[in-house]
């Protein structure tokens, strides 16, 4: 049995499972005291955008979205994130059997892996799968959905329209969900970061792919654009869940990174 070993445990997130659980409990205490989570969790979403920095900076924001997915308990989740370590032409598919997390391994959805290989010609570039943008989501997924299976897709230079077809294929199955991983602007002062990030948030909120190219500096912009296209085609309504910057944790407003989470809701037309 082949295992996608965790590569950034102890760096981006704790390697001790009790520490991860403690962080999630703390985030949820804050949420439950300040937000109507019952209403949020009742919304029909199987696709979200989440950030991927170190947990102390971005996991509060990601947790809201992954918790929403957990309420729907999908059987399979495909996590799509940008490649930071290696140059990629196209998309690399994690072709293993299990994905290691400190909370226990997640099963990799082998039927989906085989489908993506046969229908879309995806293959694995092994060195791409030490990627933090996808990995940091896995402990949260394991926490909320311990029995779900996962697929990891690491994106390089790929046409968003091609990626959107894959997303639509997955979301057309009511048992499947998609997580798009991205951070927003990087290392500007807080005022400029807020301005640039507002462009990204407006693009998501309006499902406006052209707006993304008017100043949004999200590292996972290709995945976000693909999700926007898929959401429009599937008649999903976006909802911004949270936005903050690294300054909320570090208090340093001179070089910040932006983080946001969003959900795409299937509305009851009845």
Image (spheres, rainbow, N blue to C red):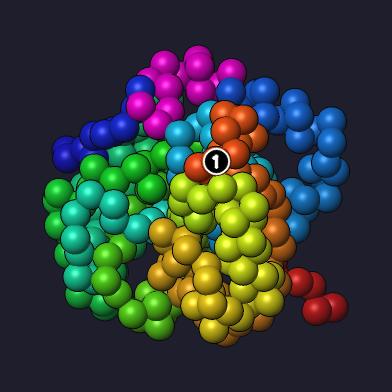
Q: Who is closer to the viewer here, 124 or 82?
A: 82
Q: How many marks?
A: 1
User: Could you tell me which quadrant the N terminus lies in?
Assistant: top left
Determine whether 226 is above or below 182 in the image: below
Determine whether 78 is above or below 27 in the image: below
Where residue 60 sits in the image (x, y, percent)? 62, 36
Q: Seen in the image, is 267 located left or right of residue 139?
A: right
Q: Secondary structure at mark 1?
A: loop
Return the residue at label 1.
254
Q: Residue at x 35, y 22 (%)?
A: 10
Where residue 181 sits in the image (x, y, percent)? 46, 54
Where residue 90 sits in the image (x, y, percent)? 24, 71
Residue 63 covered by magenta stretch: no
Where residue 167 sits in the image (x, y, percent)? 45, 71
Q: Residue at x 45, y 67 (%)?
A: 221
Q: Residue at x 42, y 39 (%)?
A: 136
Residue 19 covered by magenta stretch: yes
What span is colored magenta in the figure? Answer: 11-22
Determine whether 147 is above or below 22 in the image: below
């Amino acid at each position: 049995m082949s295992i996608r070993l965790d590569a950034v445990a102890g760096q981006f997130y704790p390697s001790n499972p009790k520490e991860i659980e403690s962080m999630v409990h703390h985030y949820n205490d804050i949420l439950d005291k300040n937000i109507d989570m019952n209403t949020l969790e009742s919304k029909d979403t199987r696709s979200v955008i989440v950030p991927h920095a170190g947990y102390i900076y971005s996991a509060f924001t990601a947790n809201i979205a992954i918790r929403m997915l957990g309420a729907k308990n999908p059987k399979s989740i495909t996590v799509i994130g940008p490649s930071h370590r290696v140059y990629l032409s196209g998309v690399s598919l994690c072709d293993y059997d299990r994905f290691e997390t400190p909370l226990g391994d997640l099963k990799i959805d082998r039927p989906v892996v085989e489908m993506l290989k046969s229908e879309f010609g995806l293959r694995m570039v092994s060195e791409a799968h030490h990627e933090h943008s996808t990995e940091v989501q896995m402990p949260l997924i394991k926490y909320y959905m311990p029995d779900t299976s996962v697929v990891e897709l690491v994106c390089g230079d790929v046409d968003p329209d091609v990626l959107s077809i894959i997303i639509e294929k997955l979301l057309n199955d009511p048992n499947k969900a998609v997580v798009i991983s991205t951070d927003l602007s990087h290392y500007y002062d807080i005022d400029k970061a807020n301005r640039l990030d507002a462009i990204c948030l407006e693009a998501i909120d309006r499902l406006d792919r052209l707006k993304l190219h008017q100043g949004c500096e999200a590292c996972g912009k290709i995945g976000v654009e693909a999700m926007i296209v898929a959401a429009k085609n599937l008649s999903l309504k976006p909802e911004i869940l949270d936005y903050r910057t690294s300054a909320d944790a570090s208090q340093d407003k001179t070089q910040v990174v932006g983080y946001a989470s969003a959900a795409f809701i299937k509305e009851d037309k009845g």
